[in-house]
Image (tube, grey):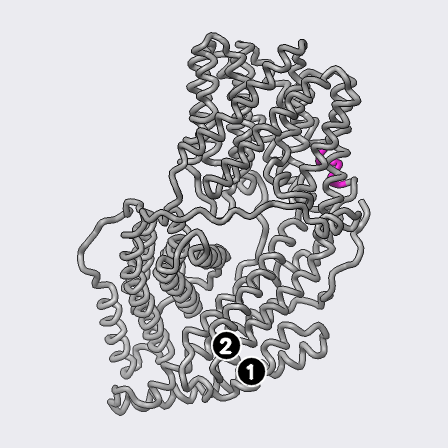
Amino acid sequence: MTRHVPRRGMAGLFAPAPDSRPAVMAGLGNGVAISVPLLAGIAAGDPQAGALAALGAYVAAFTNKGGARRPRTRGLLVAAVADAAAFWAGAWTATVFAWALVLLAVLVFLAAMGAAIHPTLERLGTMPATALLVAAGQGIGTQAGLRHAALLVLLGGLWYATATAVLTPPARLRDVLGSIAQPYRVIGRTLSILAAFPADIAHPHTARALRRAEDTTRELRGPRGDEHLADLSDPLVRHAAALADLTAALAATGPPPAAVTTPYTTATTHAGQQLCRLADRLTRRRPASTDHTPDTSMALLESACDRMRAQTAAGAHTYADTARAARQRRLLARITATTDAARADARGLARLAATRLSPPVAQAAHLDLARLRAAWTPASSTFRHALRATTVSAAVFTLTQTTALPHGEWATLAVLRVLRPQYAATRERVAQRVIGNLVGGTCAALLIAAVNQPAAICLILFAIITAGFTLRPVNYAFWVVFGTPVVLLLGDVSHPGDWSDALIRIAMTLLGTTAALLGSRLLWPSWEHPHLAARTAHARQATAAYLDTVLDSLTRPTPQGELHHARTAAEKALTQARTTAHHAHREPGHDRAALDRADTTVGALTALVPLIAALTTHRTAHTARIPALAPYTGHAAPALACTQADEMAAHTDALDGALDAMTLYLAELHTRRHSELAAQRTGDTRTRVLIREDEPVIELLGAIAAAIHRARTGPQPATEPRKEPGP
């Protein structure tokens, strides 16, 4: 079992976010919507006006949260007006520092509180504060010039809202099929990995993809879809869930015996490729391979298993290896059959990909006073973050204004971009922002020095904006690399050839990110490591509840909904513990030994959940006959969930005793089967049936017990701490 260790170093900063994909069409749409105003200004002989309109579109683009066309367009129109008003206010108060400081503080505080006050504030984010800072930095002089500039910013924002409404096609079924296809692609890749490196692997990505597919099906049953489409998509989601459990069961069997390694690898690789092709069919991708030759991999594996069974009687192989090879063949056969059923269902759904979906019913946004009162207290992490963001941004703004630093607004903007509610997230953003600005600023300086034609700059901007918004969902660091040249080149349109702004941008970024990092650590910090023990304990308890539910289902009928609810609760608690551990590693003052214990526990639980799910794939009507299954069921969950060391030792000893009894039972069955083979009894005897049905369950129970031992690395408290630590 590999320990759960957070990513570190440069590679971690640029690693794709889980389950993220480049948004190519969104990137092209943003490239067009932001570049056209600039091109129009250049064509009209007024590049500065074009740059201001492009700025309005650029700021509005960050409030584009996607979704249905009508509510999204309404939100963008509101954002365009709010950004233009903030730009006008920033230009008007540019010479009155006190007013500018007050306005900035109000806008930053409202942005940080966000949905706690009103959903519209969450959509607007820090963009009104950004518009205010940009206007204050430009220092527009006359009232006429101020109104003209604010009007251009407004027109740019309105243009962006209109352009995205026109460029975005109506919602169709194909837009949501990607979520249903993703579990198949993830499972297919997992099978390919399993073919090359047989191991006990667990992928949290599979669980996330399955939950997203389930959410998509629920949406299709709502106002946005219809019952017919939901009825067609439901079987695909169920097939994906079954394939995930079968794949986990296959991984739990370990590497194949040497006698069947080649056909096993071929069959597993083919199964993975078939799942990826199924995902391609749902998402209208061209398959990577179009080989239509009949598949013989399963037939070859079956022949190899038959030869191995015939040679076992002569002592060439142990019966345990022969049984394992047969078990792997049966699991691959079930994976193939489930894939065939999913492919048949996918054909019908893919033919309806062009079906238009109704827009969701618009829900009126309102001020939730109860939620606001709960958030408006020092005990609220949201309120503390709002105070922190307001204080740090106001301090940096004051410093840059009183010292008259050139482009000082960039330092305050850096604070707004990197300061997150958690110190660990802020630290990661700081590193991404600094490195991205160094790379992007250097490239922008070279472009500014080499390119002097506004039209050429406009074309370059289109390419950079398209690439930046395409990669923005993948990783924030990619956006910074491309976003820095966008800001600098927009300024270069009206002040060509001034590449020194790139150096100033880098310097101001260093100032702002340093202030943000210090503020995150010193001002009302929200540490994660004090919560790590409690959240790890909660993950253990939720996983224990899931284990208990599945073990009970082996001996009595259990509703599928009960199993699903227990599994979802365990996965949710485990995700929270994993995220907390990830943040705790980046916080100062943590206990290294406690973090190592938590990493071991989280890693063991990550492996344990798919093992528990795999147990359901081997359930039969006769599973309850396995010796010592009742005491195993009675002690497994308590061994994982209990908090007292003496109780844990008692449950663990009882668990080991139950496993010993099961192991002796299997050994007796193998001895009996060897005698049958020696007597040429090669048919489907009762002993063979018992081995076929009971051995995979007992092996999984052993693997589950081993994971429980790994998860119990030390006593951990089961309650959240009441107080946040000081700085």
Taking 208 as reference, is 716 left or right?
right
Q: In which quarter of the image is residue 311?
A: bottom left
Q: Where is residue 101 in the image (x, y as percent from the top left)?
A: 76, 25
Picture residue at 59% right of the left edge, 35% below the top: 432
Do the residues under discs 2 and 1 have CB atoms within 8 angstroms? Answer: yes
Q: Where is residue 250 in the image (x, y as percent from the top left)?
A: 39, 67
Does dot 2 land on a helix, a strand or a loop? helix
- Count the marks: 2
Q: Which residue is at a point 74% across and 25% down the rendered structure image?
A: 397
Q: Is residue 304 left or right of residue 52?
A: left
Which residue lies under the disc numbered 2? 701
Name the main secondary structure of what is drawn in magenta. Answer: helix
Question: Dot 1 surroundings within 10 Å: few (below 14), some, or many (20 or more)?
Answer: many
Which contiguous range is marked in magenta?
A: 516-521
Quadrant position of residue 484: top right
Amino acid residing under circle 1: Tyr
* Image quadrant where residue 302 sits: bottom left
Q: Is residue 477 above or below residue 216?
A: above
Q: Where is residue 418 in the image (x, y as percent from the top left)?
A: 64, 35
Say which quadrant the C terminus sits in.
top right
Q: Is mark 1 on a helix, strand or loop?
A: helix
Q: Is there any visible trace of residue 196 in the rendered image?
A: no
Please indicate whether residue 207 sits to the left or right of residue 289 in the image.
Answer: right
Q: Can you say whether 544 is above or below 22 in the image?
A: below
Asked if residue 520 lies in the magenta stretch, the reply is: yes
Q: Of 11 and 433, which appears nearest the observer?
A: 433
Relative to 449, residue 312 above or below? below
Residue 153 at x, y = what percent? 56, 21
Between the residue at mark 2 and the residue at mark 1, the CA separation in whole angstroms equals 9 Å
Check the image and name the residue furthest to the left. Answer: 293
Mark sitting on residue 632: 1
Foreground: 603 or 417?
417
